[in-house]
Image: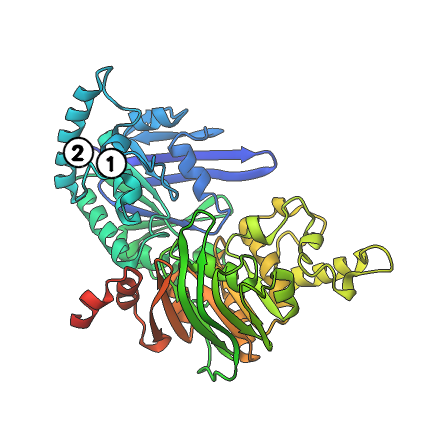
Amino acid sequence: MNKPTHPYAIELRGISKRFGAVQANKDINLQVPAGTVHGIIGENGAGKSTLMSIIYGFYEADSGTIEIDGQEVKIRNSQDAIKAGIGMVHQHFMLVENFTVLENVILGAEGGTILKGGMDAARKELARLEQEFSLDIDVDAVVEDLPVGLQQRVEILKALYRGARILILDEPTGVLTPQEADHLFRILDALKKQGVTVILITHKLREILASTDNVSVMRLGQMVAHRETAKTEKEELAELMVGKKVRLKVLKEEAEPAEVKLAAKNISYVDSQGVTRLKNINLELRAGEIVGIAGVSGNGQSELLNVLSGITPMSSGEVHMAGQVITPKAPKNAAQMRDLKMGHIPEDRHKMGLVTGFEAYEAAVLGYHNDPAYNGKIFLNRKAMLDECNERMQDWDVRPPNPHLKTANFSGGNQQKIVIAREVEKNPDVLLVGQPTRGVDIGAIENIHEQIIKLRVADKAILLVSVELDEIMALSDRILVMFDGEIVGELPASEADERTLGLMMANAFNEEGASA
């Protein structure tokens, strides 16, 4: 690939975009030096996604200009962006799973009516790109058979095959093990050396510091700071994102685990398609202890939460809680588990935590609406529900603090606060926590972590599932690792590090860990 001919690969001048009353971007100015990795960070709603969508042609800016290699361009759609040399790797991959790598890469760019000629030319070009950018991958492999890290490389190959000189990556490490993330950053370094410019959108400050040359910070739709990465640090970037100082470390005392509050014995679960999703799961949750579950998404963590919470009936095994034994022949549903003082913060707040058409005060009692506190003689006690919702909104800094606002109209982070407050404030004995800070602003993460620690101090038993290894290591007292529906390892959090957990998450610890 040719070396850059202009000092800036992309320049934005005065970019603004409004959606009705919401000013998503306001007078954005940005210069991205050619052949560098440039990070863009900001809280949810800061305008990052809107800005990237403008660059890639999903939206048109209301005002402002875009220059590529010093030349002003009009980007009205993604085809204009591709012609301008811009590629984008989305957080959720845009791949046809039953196609091969080669078929996915050329899809939409077949190169003529005679498919074989286009396929042969593409195969030759992909071999060149793989070698040039260290993207080792079998082009004849079927995508659904590839691990997620290799699927991401397919997306990068797609963009490079279409001539991308500017590559936008949106939260690229969210589904990767630490080892896969490290390999991705080596790929980005190879791209940079060949003159490709990378724009990295991520909320992980550690990755920004480790992989970028420069970083720009957005807040409330505006660009508020630009920093040379080598001359900044996590604390400064966090403060720039939030507008106030943020404590990045979780403060907690040594755990003092007490009696067992929940025990799972040989739990298995086979889904409706006959696929075994959980295999002989054994675990104990003790009062005053946080047990974290690490693993790449899709390895059984979600199914485990659903089985323990009573949403999904187990296929075999037993759950012991509050003097009850739950089995396939003597099951308990989610409401009955809640009666046993189990709380559940689901991983997907939209599908399982909220009814987005409900007003906030209604969503704040979902699952607990039969409690006497909310029931009048005939109808629900609306005043009690509103009073409690108002109080929780203040305590949990839900914005806007309007209990009558439809749940759908809150940002993702504020929706999450509504769900977490609902479960935590009910003072459960056992709390199942799925992805507690997914989509939550960095300023609110601190409060959520504090509330989880408070429950631990109050002798609650907590099971934490998170794809954020930093979160697992910071909050947990004991860490279990899941792979392909099984618990493949356990270790005290005090002995955990990213490399060890990453190897366990890939089920490679026995091969590599012993000699590490």
What's the residue at 17%, 33% (across, down)? 126
Give SS at disc 1: helix
> Which residue is disc 1 drawn over?
101
Whether residues under marks 1 and 2 lie with C-beta atoms below 8 angstroms apart, the answer is yes
Kindly tell me whether residue 478 is visible in this rendering. Answer: yes
Q: Is residue 402 left or right of residue 140?
A: right
Vertical position of residue 29 compared to residue 378: above or below: above
Q: Position of residue 284 (x, y in %)?
A: 46, 75
| Amino acid on which the number 2 mark rests in the picture | Leu
- State which mark lies toward you, 1 or 2: 1
Earlier-in-chain disc, 1 versus 2? 1
Real-space CA distance between mark 1 and mark 2, rounded to the nearest whole angstrom: 10 Å
> Which residue is disc 2 drawn over?
126
Vertical position of residue 116 compared to residue 86: above or below: above
Q: Position of residue 23 (x, y in %)?
A: 55, 39
Q: Classify 10 Å Cα crowding around label 1: few (below 14), some (14-19), many (20 and above).
A: many
Give SS at disc 2: helix
Q: Classify 10 Å Cα crowding around label 2: few (below 14), some (14-19), many (20 and above).
A: many
Residue 127 lies in quadrant? top left
Q: Position of residue 193 (x, y in %)?
A: 16, 44
What's the residue at 31%, 28% (across, down)? 82
Q: How is the image coloured?
A: rainbow
Quadrant containing the C terminus in the rendered view: bottom left
Vertical position of residue 14 compared to residue 491: above or below: above
What's the residue at 57%, 52% (across, down)? 352
What's the residue at 86%, 56% (across, down)? 378
Vertical position of residue 469 compared to residue 86: above or below: below
Residues 215 and 408: in front is 408
